[in-house]
Amino acid sequence: MKTIAHFLNILFALAIAGPLLAADPRNISWQDLLPEERPYHDPFATLEYSQVNALAMLYRIEVLHADTADDKKRAEAVQIREDLVSQGLDPDWLFEQREIVMNQRLIAAREPNLDLLGENVRLPGYLLPLDIVDQKAVEFLLVPTVGACIHTPPPPANQMVYVRYEQGFEIDELYKPVWISGEMQALSRSQSLNYVDGQANIETSYAMDALSVEIYD
């Protein structure tokens, strides 16, 4: 009889422990936030630096400054175009490819990893406060490297997480890493931030209502 009771106690304990274990957040890295790679043709990858520089100069004169370029610049553009064509390149086709490549890079920088959405995860990073109440950050960005968005350019949108933490996290200093835990969500958001040398809009692709924020050990 004691054996049966003991067995039932074990089953009961497992029934309780099962959901708790399943709810434990899964540790992830910033690499996990990237979407599945989509290969695309990049004709600029095989060009020499001098050719890329020449194309950039030609694009500025013929496209960006088409209405303001003087005769000297237009003559320079003619010479650059002739040089590129003599090397077997088609500047007009490469201009079209530029738009395609830029769009592909933009998708790679913004698109979230769909497999991660709705998952209970734990992610390390550095806190960048957006809203502070009573010396505690209740809204912040989590970034992968110290000083990102302050001393260095912001990471891609899918390499930052917009975090809401109602109970707030007391800020001693910004250079200590933290863990955030909670359900990862997709949320395209733009936030105006002040840099050391100016102001810029920061785009994020992820959001989280954090269940916990802890010092990284």
Image: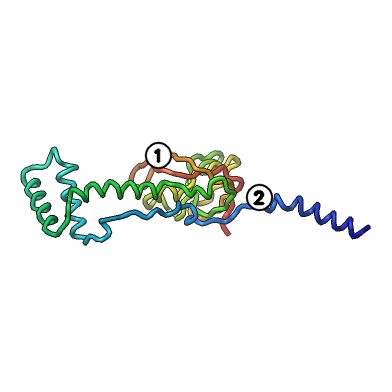
Which amino acid, by three-letter code, is at mark 1? Ser
Q: Is residue 38 left or right of residue 135?
A: left
Q: Is residue 121 left or right of residue 15?
A: left
Q: Is residue 205 left or right of residue 153?
A: right
Residue wearing tag 2 = 23
Q: Is residue 206 left or right of residue 53?
A: right
Residue wearing tag 1 = 192
Picture coordinates of residue 97, whole percent (x, y): 26, 49
| Residue at 39% across, 53% down | 38
Q: Give the numbered dot on residue 116.
A: none
Picture coordinates of residue 121, whole percent (x, y): 58, 51
Above or below residue 209? Residue 54 is: below
Tell me the quarter of the image containing the N terminus.
bottom right
Which amino acid, by three-letter code, is at mark 2? Ala
Mark 2 is surrounded, within 10 Å at the Cα level, by few (under 14), some (14 to 19) or many (20 or more) other residues, namely: few
Picture coordinates of residue 159, whole percent (x, y): 44, 51
Q: Of helix, strand and loop, which one carries label 2?
A: helix
